[in-house]
Image: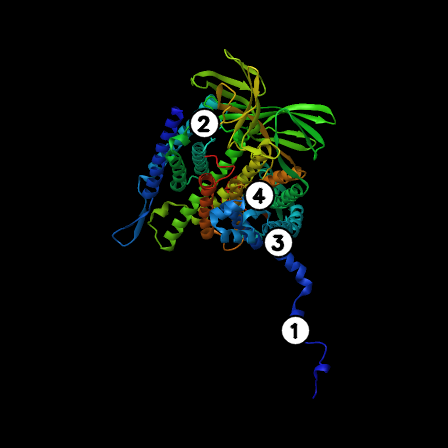
Amino acid sequence: MANSIAEEPLSKKSSELPGWSRFNWAGLPGKVVDTLSSLRLAISLFIALAILSTIGTIIQQGETPEFYIKEYGEPMYGWFQTFGFTDVYAQTWFRAVLGLLIVNSLTCFYKRFPGIWRSMRQSNIAVPPTFIEGLKQHVEVPLKSDSGKVAEEMIDILGGRGYRVSASRAKDNISVFATKGIMGRVGAHVAHVSAAIIVLGGLIGSVAGFRDFGIGLPGETYYIPQGDFSLKVEKFWMDYYENGAIKSYNSTLTVVDKGQEKFTKTISVNDPLVYNDIWLYQSSYGDHWDKVDKARVMITEKGSENVVGDVMLDWGEPLRVPDIDLGLRVTGFAADFAFDSETKQVSSKTSEHKNPAVQITITEVDKTFNPWFFVDFPGIIDIPDSSYAFEIVGYLPSKYTGLQMGHNPGITIVWTGCLLIVVGMSLSSFVFHRRLWVNIQKDGDNSKLYIGGNTHKGQIDFSREFATLTDRIRHIG
Amino acid sequence: MFTSLFLFDLTFWLYLAAVGLYIGYVALGRTRVQVAGAGTGNISTSDYSAPVGQLATMITFVGVFVNTLALGTRAYERYQLTGTFAPWSNQFEAMAFVAWSIIVGYLILEFKYGIKAIGAFVVSIGFIAMGAASLLPYRYQTAEPLVPALNSYWIYIHVSVTLTSYAAFAMAGGLGVMYLLKERAELNGNTSSLTSAFPSLETIDELGYKAITIGFPLLAFGIILGAMWANYAWGGYWSWDPKETWSLIVWLIYGAYIHARMTRGWGGHRAAIYAIFGFLMVIFCFWGVNFLLSGLHAYA
């Protein structure tokens, strides 16, 4: 045998090499950059992100399991949980697509911007007439003027229309190059980088920031640990339009820092308070569950069933009922009455006014009673030793304020990115890079002009501009 | 209230007349091949297309003038009733404002490029927008005071900018339809069809592209203004509520369009279909989200 496997020559034809050695490893980084910066990837990612985002609008996000089971059934809810459809935008796969889009836009910048930057600085002034004739817009114009004079007027005309003009002189011709709107090419790159800035700001905000919600009872002070200051809720009130609709709800808050009252501000929706980089928003309001502002009590004489009194009581304020020896004072309230038989304490089961009950301290002649009356069940509470029957006709709930609190360290970055992206997109949409080349051939005392130009966007407008320019040029001399 | 409602009504009829006239202009503009005795064909257009076209433009001007009056009157009425004066504060007003933007945008386009045939496709969308607004039940049409969350100067900028972007996308959608019709006529070799009055496919395509390049940054700006507003009102600039998410979806869809235009094979035909599809998404974002999906943003 001439050749055994052990003696095979070292150099082989590439087709005889095993597959993985044929692969051009050295070119891999380049290929990766190419793919990552490709337009097709961008298009696919835009569409993918759009489709995935749709899911979160069809399936309500962040609801309770009971809600989903009721709406979709238990097996479907199981699928939702597996895929994370109940919290789409926080899922890793969603964020991965978004992240890939940012990588895509940054790689595009990395790959293509240096070229744009370079071409912004250098320009090919002198081009042969054949190049000009190859341009989409081109025309030949003979002029009865000396080429030098033509060049001077040309530069004037083009400069007057906002172009940056340069010229170079050769033995028998003069070349003029005019360019305008190069920033239009930069626009897309600015937009790409800004997108990354926005996402970065968002990331910082979600990692290093926080959002919280709290209830503020008027008169109370609350310590905000994240900001190391306290907030005193001075007052909360609501304003109404003439037709009864709610116009605004407002809280007067005082910031107390290390025992010192710093300032007081009234906040309302769209008008938050800021201190130590913590923002406090008027978010909502609600009905207090263990306090009322007023209660209206109807007093009926037992036996005769005559109404002897219909009084409005203020919380905690004693009131003497006229004509009879009766004193009333509201001393307790529970929005959803619950009674603990061990501690003998009344409390509110929930914050909702499902079974409201008012406690009234009754002073009758020389007796005192402290019963609880149920608003929805009048008449079931009877005080045997009293001559009267009491009914809570209605009550005015005390309102508490709902405050949203937040801190977002990334927000300045986000707004910067937003400003830049609008600038970049506008440049890209409204500023077009146009270039004109003119080759002025000497023809004795006359000239022969080759004029041509192109634009990277906006062909119709440019063709009109080109026609206007050549018209002006025809009238030179 | 009734003054503005009357003026909005009048706008509807004027836009209807304008659409009829533009369609008439297109119909009359079809080239007719007349065969003379010797077998040669003479191509002629009807004598009436030009004056009909001019009348169409005039009626459109009157219509948009009345539309402006209507919006201005509504702004004044709102101010008297509620203290705010943005005439795009509910679904009805927003639709009327979009119609106004579309017509204004169209008139600028017609003034700049002189192509009246586009009127049949774009003014019709403005008319449909105004019509849809008129079909809303009366309780949606009146000016009610704003809920606290909307009661802010942000409504003047965020809403108007976003609605104007919708108008731009509407124009692109109309131009997309125009493109497809002309393309089909050309493929069938139909030289005497309605589409003969249309400009070239290249022109229609480029104008549609231009409309999207205007709408796209406007929408971005509108979304960003909305985020800024949310930050002041709700304590977070992005909460993925259906409206926010859908406006982002629309933005992503047009972002894909912008990038696709730079690749081969995405010119003319595909771009036209895409522009129509994008506009349908805009309609869902504008209208569908308010009525079909719930969330913080359901301000019909």
Label 1 SS: loop
Above or below — where is A68 with respect to B54?
below
Tell us which disc is closer to us: 1 or 4: 1
**Residue A210: x, y in percent?**
65, 39
Do marks 1 and 3 share a subunit?
Answer: yes
Q: Which amino acid does label 3 sit on?
A: Ser
Badge nearest the viewer, 2 or 3: 2
Is B292 on the left or on the right of B158, as rendered? left
Lower sequence index among marks 4 and 3: 3
Pair 4/2: label in front: 2
Q: Please, which chain is the residue tagged with disc 4 on?
A: A
Q: Are marks 1 and 4 in contact (CB under 8 Å)?
A: no
- Graded by Cα atoms within 10 Å as few (under 14), some (14 to 19) or many (20 or more), the crowding at tag 3 reads many
The residue identified by callout 3 is A37
Distance Cα–Cα, label 1 vs label 3: 30 Å
CA gap between label 1 and label 4 equals 48 Å
Mark 4: give few (<14), some (14-19) or many (20+) Cα within 10 Å. Answer: many
Q: Which of A209 and B75 is in front in this view?
A: A209
CB under 8 Å between discs 4 and 3 = no
Q: Residue furthest left?
A: B37
**Residue B34 position in % (x across, y down):** 28, 49
Is residue A135 visible in this depiction of the protein?
A: no
Q: How far apart are marks 4 and 3 (CA)?
A: 18 Å
Could you say whether the residue bearing mark 4 is in a helix, strand or loop?
A: helix
**Mark 3, secondary structure of its residue:** loop
Please name the residue that numbered disc 4 is placed on. A428
Question: Which image quadrant is residue B126 in?
Answer: top left
Mark drawn on residue A18: 1
Residue at the disc numbered 2: B144
> How many C-alpha atoms fall within 10 Å of the one at disc 1: few (<14), some, or many (≥20)?
few
Residue A318, numbered label = none
